[in-house]
Image: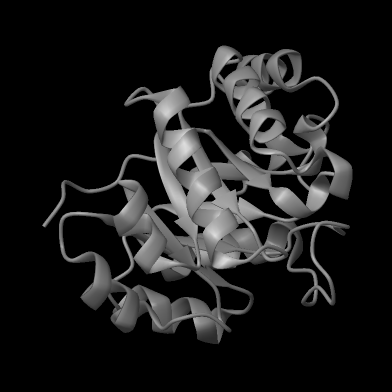
Amino acid sequence: MPEPVRLPKLYAILDVACFAPPLRTIAAIADYARELAAGGVTWLQYRNKVGHTREMLSHARELRRVLGNGVTLIMNDRADICIAAGYEGVHVGQDDLSAEGARTVIGRGRILGVSTHNLEQLQEANAGPADYIAYGPVFATLSKRGPDALVGLDGIRAARAATRKPLVAIGGITRANARSVLDAGADSVAVISDLLGSPTKVAEEFLCLMV
């Protein structure tokens, strides 16, 4: 069993869908990841809901190669690619492979995260094999089609009271509201859109805000 997960304050998500199709090249994605790491990102989730398996594996392996062991890499959804690319863990949603199934695939030595959107789901994740739990969306977000109902800061407070597992808040989190989310009880904030413009600079600003 791995040591208890210690989440960084900033949990960056590289979502391939945020790149315009002509820019979804392996070089562009690797460069973006390098810029995030240069800004201090130490955890990065690779998410690809629009590509095929061969593309995902190619991207995932290149990210592992260019980032080395200095960044903890989490694969969204695909436990098999997590193993094949040598990632530290996998993150599954409510419509993906179950937490129990993912744990069976990755074993006990890798990290398992689970997305939840209400307290019932969170309590189920709390009782299961997840090492950390994501909860949200906290605020309105454009990064997910058909997003779930907003939980708000009160939702984060309720989630904190319901679990002792590390808690990642997700959904519409920016430099303007990140501190309030941590103050409400989250251990970490997952960020997608606010990092896109100037990843190195923005990552540095996030980390300065959340000291």
User: Is residue 165 at all visible to an observer of this figure?
Assistant: no
Residue plotted at (61% across, 40% down):
183
Q: What percent of the width, then of the height, locates residue 172?
A: 80, 50
Q: Does 178 sit left or right of 5 as displayed?
A: right
| Figure colour scheme | one colour
Q: Does 158 sit left or right of 60 as displayed?
A: right
Q: Does 53 sit left or right of 131 as displayed?
A: right
Q: What percent of the width, then of the height, locates residue 109?
A: 16, 55
Residue plotted at (66% across, 29% down):
27
Q: What percent of the width, then of the height, locates residue 160?
A: 49, 60
Give the quadrant of residue 173.
top right
Q: What percent of the width, then of the height, locates residue 37?
A: 54, 20
Give the tally of numbered discs.
Answer: 0
Point out the image quarter for the C terminus.
Answer: top right
Q: Does 13 sit left or right of 199 as displayed?
A: left
Residue plotted at (81% across, 57% down):
143
In this picture, is 198 found above or below 159? above
Point out the image quarter for the N terminus.
Answer: bottom left
In this picture, is 11 found above or below 93? above
Give the quadrant of residue 158.
bottom right
Residue that protrudes farthest toward the front in the picture:
54
User: Is residue 88 at all visible to an observer of this figure?
Assistant: yes
Which one is nearer the viewer's eye here, 5 or 79? 79
Residue plotted at (52% across, 39% down):
44
Give the quadrant of residue 197.
top right
In this picture, is 2 found above or below 39? below
